Amino acid sequence: MRKTFTALAVASLSFLGAVGSAQAQVNLKNYVQCRSTELVQFQGTLVDAAIATPELSTLTNLVVAANLVGALSGPGPFTVFAPTNAAFAKVPAPLLSLIGSDTGLLTSVLTYHVTKGHADPRKPITPVQFKTLQGQTLYAGYDADGASVNQSVAACKGVQTSNGTVWLIDSVLLPQFK
């Protein structure tokens, strides 16, 4: 099975290289290693995992402020692309303050980070779409920077919880605002 996967990956990369895609810059060894990284098993919900992860304290506080704890503790499965504290630190303070001061806006931003089902940013070499709970679409795939969601880099090691999966990402995803 691993040989078949490697052969398919090599064939895919060759094809992509032939069409001049930026995706051809993918390092096959890193892709295979990232893709085969085992998920960490966590006994608890997505919210429990976020609370237990010091790197996600800002996200946890915002989930509580938006009153999303109940929804994200539900049966799922959900996938959460979780911005780290460092990701939130990159957001300009006035914008973060604006988002945090408006519950509707905060809920929109946070639910843009959540999809129903299992979304694994490590798997596709070409981007695939995932509809978010907020209603808009995210794009996930593996490129020269590694596993990615929109323009954010995702960790290769996700956390499997009782109601879904958490992937740490290095930036805050913002939906399109009307």
Image (spheres, rainbow, N blue to C red):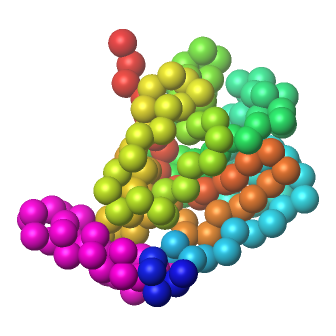
Looking at the image, residue 80 sits to the left or right of residue 171; the answer is: right
Find residue 132 and report its horizontal and vertical position in percent.
54, 31
Find residue 71 and report its horizontal and vertical position in percent.
78, 28
In the image, is residue 136 above or below residue 3?
above
**Residue depicted at x 50% and y 32%:** 131
Find residue 142 and report its horizontal and vertical position in percent.
38, 63
Residue most toward the right? 43
> Toward the viewer: 109 or 132?
132
Looking at the image, residue 71 sits to the left or right of residue 147; the answer is: right
Main SS of the magenta part reads helix
> Does residue 142 show up magenta in the picture?
no
Q: Is residue 30 visible?
A: no
Looking at the image, residue 130 sits to the left or right of residue 143; the answer is: right
**Residue depicted at x 71% and y 24%:** 66
Q: Quadrant of residue 101?
A: top right
Quadrant, the C terminus: top left
**Residue depicted at x 64% and y 36%:** 116
In the image, is residue 173 above or below residue 36?
above
In the image, is residue 175 above or below residue 141?
above
Q: Is residue 13 visible?
A: yes
The segment highlighted magenta reads 6-33
Find residue 164 and report its horizontal and vertical position in percent.
74, 48
